[in-house]
Image: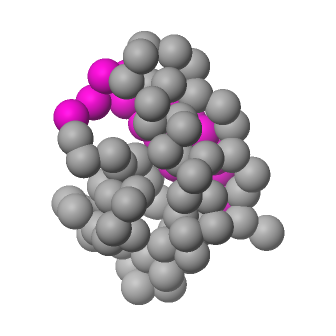
Amino acid sequence: MPTISTFYGMLIKMFFDDHSPAHFHVQYAEFKAVIAIESLSVIRGHLPRRAQELVLDWTELHQQELLEDWALCQAKQQPKPIEPLL
C-alpha cells in the first residue's frame, strides 16, 4: 500500500486495485480510518476530532490529485506523492 502523503503524524495511503468508492486510508497513532474522496466523509474507522478535521481539509484541497492517484492505483500503477498539509 503506497504512502502518498504524511503530515502531523498521519500517514495517507492507497491500496492497488481497491474496491469502490474512491477512497484512501489514514493511520494516526493507534487510529485508522477510510476517507471517501468525493463525499469528503469517513466511511470506516475513527480519528480524533482534530485529526479528522485536518484530513478532511487536506482532502478538499487535493481532491483532484487524490482522484488521479485513485485511477493510477486502480490500474496497478504507482500513485504520485501529494503535498502535505502545512
User: Residue 62 appears at what percent x and percent y?
Assistant: 62, 58
Residue 65 placed where, x, y %? 61, 47
**Highlighted magenta segment, given as a residue range:** 1-19
Snapshot colouring = one colour
Question: In the image, is residue 55 part of the stretch drawn in magenta?
Answer: no
Left or right for 85, reference 44: right
Q: Quadrant of residue 81?
A: top right
Residue 51 seen in the current view: no
**Quick one: which residue is furthest to the top in this view?**
76
Q: Nearer the viewer, residue 75 or 58?
A: 75
> Which residue is pictured at 66% across the width and 31% down the height?
80
19 w.r.t. 62: above or below: above
Depth order, front residue of 73/5? 73
Point out the image quarter for the C terminus: bottom right
How many marks do you count on the picture?
0
Query: Residue 7 magenta-drawn?
Result: yes
Identify which residue is drawn at 46% across, 60% down: 28
Residue 85 point in image, percent of width and height: 71, 65
Residue drawn 54% across the image and 58% down it: 63
| Furthest-bottom residue in this view | 49
Q: Position of residue 41 (x, y in %)?
A: 32, 70
Q: Most extreme residue toward the right, as rendered? A: 86
Q: Nearer the viewer, residue 4 or 61?
A: 61
| Relative to 70, 36 lies left or right | left
From where the camera sits, is residue 78 visible? yes
User: Looking at the figure, which quarter contains the N terminus?
Assistant: top left
